[in-house]
Amino acid sequence: MDSLSPEQLYEKYGSPRYEPVVRLDQCRLPVGVPENVIVPIWLGKESELVDLSEAQIILTDFGESFMPATMARPYSNAPEVLTPPEVYFEHSKSLSFPADIWTLACTIWAIIAQCPLFEGYNPSSDWVIKEQVDCLGKLPGPWWLKWDARTKWFNEIGERKIEAHSRPLEQRFNDSVRQPRQESRMDVVDEIEKVALLSMLKAMLAFIPEERPTAQEVLDCEWMQKTLTELHCLDLKGWSGIANIKL
């Protein structure tokens, strides 16, 4: 950018766009407040225009990371919708790598579906647990009995009191992945890919931490291997291309 003149900069990225500063009460602006502000310039480009060869992933901000072998931490500072269930029910146990597997599953879903798996605006812990049960099924016995708020939404066998409000994982997939892609005329997710993806996510979202796969086992899953192979070959035609999404 240092080599561009203002005219060249405007030609490449557009002229500055001004927005008037207006008070909510419609009164005159105080002295010293500018009458207009300039919308920040965007120097990027749409994801479809970025080749994989030029895409760079940078991992940053490890301020919340810790080594389970040397530090005990029974709590999580992740957003509530990403928090694994053991945080709520196993207060005396330290989190370990299975908690990351749970959060990774939620992140994979959010990338594919463009919305969180467990939804809620500034949700309480009970609301998040409700979302987890609604999506994945009844909690393990001891946890189920510990959860006092369960009767607010579920009967004692884990079914929603109002069946129409139930949204299991497969329905969330249809609502948040398959249907939007059809409406946008994108490649349809075929049944083979759907089964492979949901099978991987269900394993990663096992309620009992010890039952979740390791990171290596996740990499070895059918869906992950197929996606990685296609990305490596830059050929997404054979698989419905769920990884080739707009971010």
Image (cartoon, rainbow, N blue to C red):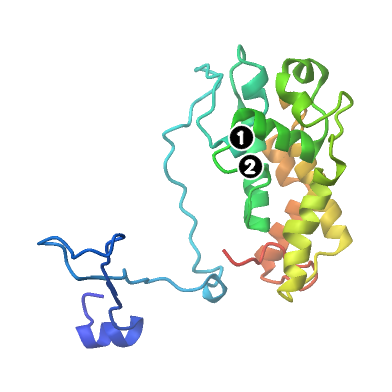
The answer to whether residue 118 of the structure is visible from this angle is yes
Q: Residues within 10 Å of mark 2 (few under 14, many from 20)?
A: some
* Rendering coords of residue 68 (x, y %): 55, 22
Question: Amino acid type of disc 2?
Answer: Leu
Q: Measuring from the top left, give residue 67's x and y in whole percent.
A: 51, 24
Contact flag, marks 1 and 2 (Cβ < 8 Å): yes
Image point (28%, 79%), residue name: 16
Residue 10 appears left or right of 96:
left
Q: How many marks?
A: 2
Q: Amino acid at mark 1?
A: Asp
Q: Would you place residue 125 above or below residue 245 in this image?
A: above
Residue 236 placed where, x, y %?
Answer: 72, 70
Q: Residue furthest left?
A: 31
- Residue beneath disc 1: 100
Q: Residue at x 54, y 27 (%)?
A: 76
Numbered tag placed on residue 68 in the rendering:
none
Quarter assignment of residue 206: top right
Quarter of the image with the N terminus in it: bottom left
Q: Percent position (x, y) of residue 39?
A: 31, 70
Q: Secondary structure at mark 2?
A: helix
Q: Which residue is found at the position 62% from the left and 15% from the top?
A: 93
> How far is mark 1 from mark 2, CA to CA?
6 Å
The quadrant holding residue 237 is bottom right
Which secondary structure lies at badge 1?
helix
Residue shown at 53% from the left, 76% from the top: 49
Where does the C terminus fall, quadrant-wise?
bottom right
Q: Does residue 13 appear left or right of residue 120 in this picture?
A: left
- Residue 5 in view, yes or no: no
Query: Which residue does the numbered mark 2 point to in the structure image?
Result: 104
Q: Is residue 79 left or right of residue 155?
A: left
* The one of 135 and 42 positioned closer to us in this rendering: 135
